[in-house]
Every structure is written in C-alpha cells, then in structure tokens.
Amino acid sequence: MTEGLSSSTTNGDQDINSSLIEEVACELESMRKKCTQHDDGTMACHYIPSTCLEIIQSLPGNQSCIDCQARNPDWVTISYGALLCMNCASKHRSLGVNYSKVRSLTMDHFSAKQVLILLEGGNQQLRGFFERHELSTDENSSKRYFTKAARFYRSGIDQHVTKLAKRPYEGREASRRGYSCSSSGQSIQNCSSQ
C-alpha cells in the first residue's frame, strides 16, 4: 500500500498512486454527500475513510508525534494537519481551540474538509515550517503555537483546503501545481454509483 505513495517515476507506481488518489477522491466525495449541517452550523460527519487514513499515516513525518517524536501517533491537530501522541494531544487541548483543535484519528468524526487538511498537511511539512521560522521543535515548547507564524500556517492551510474542497481531490502534487484540472473529475462522477 505505502509503496504507491512514494514519488517514484515508474509507470506501475504512478498507476498505483493514481488509483489511490482516485479512491481518496471517491471517499472524500462520499463524505461530502453524507455530511449534513445542523441548524447551529455544526457538521455531522463520519470516521476517516480507510484509504484516506492509510495515506495520512504514511505521509512523511507522520510516523512520529510532531511534538515529542513518539512512534505511531493516533491523535491529530486539525488546525495544523499534524499527528500527535495521546500525551501531546492533551497538551494541545489545553492550548484552546483557537490554537489547536484535537481529534482522535480513529475514534472521532471528521468533515471532508478536515480530512483534506490532514491529507494536505503532515508532520514533516509543519516541522519544516517551524524550523524555517526558527521556532523550537523540542517537545516542551508549546509557545510556538501562539506565534504569528503559527497563526499564518493555520490560516494558510485553511485557505488552501477551502480552495481544494470546491473540486475533486487530485492529490498533493496536483494541489501544489496551482489547482489545475485533470481527468479525475470524471472519476468522481463514477463514484456516485458506488
């Protein structure tokens, strides 16, 4: 499964990668259709679909907690699209929802947009951002989440995903090429019959 997620250039790997992206696009479209909005504005949604979950867990850096490097994190901060261990998730909860919205990767419900944030984010991406902005990456430094740079990151990933949510998902590489259209739009139409 994860072999298709690498950036190999062989045709077989590209076919697997393309197949996975189409499957993710179908899962996201299904989530969009199933999510309903309540009168108070909250969304009633579902667990992360299996292919999306596998891809999220296989993203670079997501095999360890963003804050303490504990292996196999099973919590997320939706605000940053990053994975956390249970101990760091409790620390993030204490930051407040204005700074970090925390969910269990396997026990909580997500909207399609929240899953997109996790697909487009990732621990390596966030860690690199913190390093470029000279924000401490040691596990005791929750101060970095209160900085202007962190607010910029939260806002940026939210804006990025808001644009992506308006069209069928084409994968991380496509989203970074300027939101170009491809043939995967037809694939989504085929998903509605599944």
Image (cartoon, rainbow, N blue to C red):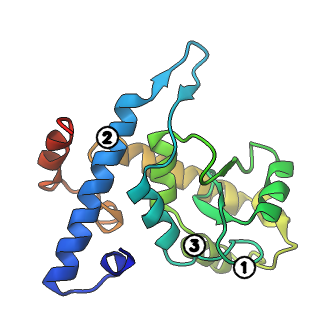
Sequence order check, earlier mark of 3 and 1: 3
* Amino acid carrying mark 3 in the image: Asn
Instruction: Please say if the residues under marks 1 and 2 sit with CB atoms less than 8 Å apart.
Output: no
Q: Residues within 10 Å of mark 3 (few under 14, many from 20)?
A: many
Residue 138 left/right relative to 106: right
Q: Is residue 169 visible?
A: no
Q: Position of residue 76 (x, y in %)?
A: 64, 57
Q: Quadrant of the N terminus?
A: bottom left
Relative height, residue 64 to residue 24 (above, below): below
Name the side, left or right, on which 20 lies relative to 42. Answer: left
- Label 3, label 1: how far apart the Cα atoms are: 9 Å
* Mark 3 lies on residue: 62
Secondary structure of the residue carrying numbered label 1: loop
Where disc 2 sits, the SS reads helix
Task: Write the residue at 74% across / 43% down.
Answer: 98
Using the image, tell me which numbered label, if any, was put on residue 29: 2
Which residue is drawn at the image coordinates 50% and 78% (left, top)?
Answer: 60
Residue 16: give its label: none
Local packing at callout 2 (Cα closer than 10 Å; few below 14, some 14-19, many 20+) is many
**Three-letter code for the amino acid on which mark 2 is drawn:** Glu
The local secondary structure at tag 3 comes to: loop
Q: Earlier in the sequence, mark 1 or mark 2?
A: 2
Whether residue 122 sits left or right of residue 28 in the image: it is: right
What residue sits right under mark 1 in the picture?
69
